[in-house]
Amino acid sequence: MALKLRLAADLLTTLRGLSGAILVVRPSLVVLLVGIVTDWIDGPLARRAGPTPFGARFDLEADSILTLGASVAATRAGGSPALLIAPLLRYAAVAVSGRPLDRDSVRWDRITGVAQMAVLAAAVAPAPFRALRILALPISAARCAAMLVQVQRSR
């Protein structure tokens, strides 16, 4: 049973990474929502099966690919190119810190990450929701600040 749960979690994580790659070439709210939903589902499945170091790292990378793809899609849909800074900064932050996040950093990472995905989804969404992209730059700035604090704490 655990193997089936782990396989299902890994397949969902793979689908999330593919969603991010697809968003780069075809901005789509539906594709973005598929990626977001897989993120909500794969974690509970993986925890039931027993988390693995590979699974945790795979999940983190799929999240990053989805975020980068969503940022490219939002930029292609008329958002500011500055929306690309936070997803790209994540790779630099991981390279510099190299340590797991502490409890407070995990909390801020989740809060700013969810807010970032919400405004990126709004930027890709139909016209009435696109007005929310005005929040994209301040939220991206908050995301960058949270990552910089994580790097500083890791030193």
Image (spheres, helix red, strand yellow):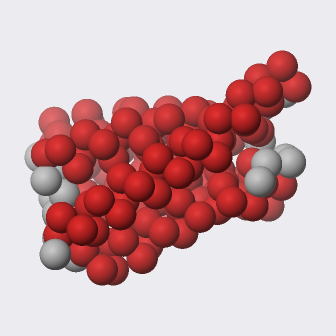
Give the residue furthest to the bottom.
95
User: What's the residue at 77%, 54% (across, down)?
Assistant: 80
Residue 21 in the image: state x and y as whole percent. 65, 61
Which sits in the foreground, 113 or 31?
Answer: 113
Q: Quadrant of the N terminus?
A: top left
Q: Is residue 87 above or below residue 117?
A: below
Is any part of residue 22 visible from this angle? no
Residue visible at 26% across and 61% down? 150
**Residue 86 position within the rendered picture, expressed as x and y whole percent measured from the top left:** 53, 60
Residue at 37% across / 36% down in the picture? 111
| Residue 130 appears in the picture as rendered | yes
Height in image: 108 above or below 53? Answer: above
How far across and down, in percent of the image, does residue 71 sit?
66, 54
Q: Residue at x 56, y 49 (%)?
A: 140
Total count of labels: 0
13 vs 11, nearest the viewer: 13
Residue 88 sits above or below residue 6 on the image: below
- The reply, left or right, for residue 112 in relation to residue 94 is right
How far across and how far down the image is residue 155, in percent?
A: 16, 75
Q: Nearer the viewer, residue 67 or 143?
A: 143
Is 140 left, or right, of 93 in this rendering?
right
